[in-house]
Amino acid sequence: MSVIVITGAAGLVGSMLRPRLARPGRTLRVLDVAPLTAGPGEEAIRASVTDMDAMTAACQGADAVIHLAGIPGEASWPRILDLNINGSYVTFEAARRAGTPRVIFASSNHAVGFTARSAFPVPDYAFPAPDTYYGVSKATVEALAAMYHHRYGLDAICVRILSCFPRPKNVRMLSTWLSPDDAGRLFEACLTAGQPGFRVVFGVSANTRGGWVSLAEARALGYEPRPSPPRSSRSKASRTRRTRSCATWAASSPSPMPRSPRPSAGRPGRIPVPAASAGVPRRGGSGRGRSRCR
Ligand SMILES: NC(=O)c1ccc[n+]([C@@H]2O[C@H](COP(=O)([O-])OP(=O)(O)OC[C@H]3O[C@@H](n4cnc5c(N)ncnc54)[C@H](O)[C@@H]3O)[C@@H](O)[C@H]2O)c1
């Protein structure tokens, strides 16, 4: 894969993926409405994913699109419809028009947020059970991805990401965290898997408290989660603080699963989501880069 378009590349996931997907001889065409500075091996495009002409131009000569752009949490229906659903339609359609053969879509566990707890680990391809308008948008775009594969032959991979942050931010993320390095490995597997067709996979690390979702289909693409390396650059104070408050957050075993899902205070029968991320739009600059154990 020599030219890869990344939409929403200025955002949290995009910023973590870019250095991890950089390769000699590979160009990352990074696209966002927010200002972007092109790094080595990158071309920056300031455009909206709702602009068909700009997106079709951005996809010219590309081998794949990683589609991250959109609202990353709950919002009003008109905004979800415009950015998450229509913006994704434009992205798939632009890829088709430009002859880009593969689209990798950042879906979410919220597409299946009301899956019954008795069904844990949630199987790959679990039928949509969205818990928000945001989740509806992810399920809708998964359906679009299926159509673009079956009707037009695009390879279309939907990654139902659980929680992709530099570090887990709360107790729930001890089970749902996708580490930045594992995110890099997973998206690289999505880029390089031979003729994947249409896939729906979960994006999560092999957390010791995990086991909420299947990793089988992600592994079938070539994804192999690994323990996170020790973060030796941390100060002694921050190491001590973290050890006390959040000792088990890192994935400590390369083999995932299965631990029984832990009972939660959340609504029975759904993947528990703290109020901070369920149904409440995240605001820009909300400190996601300053992750803390909570
Ligand atoms: N971070 C997670 O834990 C997580 C979990 C599940 C799914 N996801 C999905 O991954 C994707 C990226 O999430 P994130 O956490 O990086 O969010 P983010 O808000 O940090 O990044 C989204 C980016 O999209 C850009 N954007 C918004 N509207 C745009 C438009 N019209 N055209 C072009 N760019 C536009 C924003 O400027 C931003 O840079 C989202 O689709 C989100 O739903 C993220």
Image: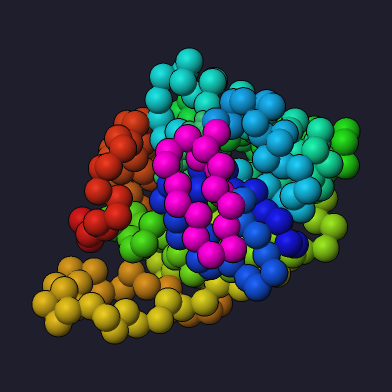
On-image quarter of the C terminus: bottom left
Of residue 66 and residue 167, the one placed in the foreground of this image is 66
What residue span does the magenta drawing correspond to? 30-47
Is residue 176 rendered to the left or right of residue 124? left
* Image quarter of residue 3: bottom right
On-image quarter of the N terminus: bottom right
* Residue 124 in the image: above or below residue 46: below
Report the residue at 25% width, 74% height from top: 247
* Residue 236 in the image: above or below residue 206: below
Report if residue 109 is visible in the image: no
Is residue 202 rendered to the left or right of residue 291? right
Of residue 53 and residue 149, the one placed in the foreground of this image is 53
Report the residue at 14% width, 82% height from top: 236
Is residue 166 rendered to the left or right of residue 83? left
How many marks the image carries: the answer is: 0
* Residue 86 in the image: above or below residue 57: above
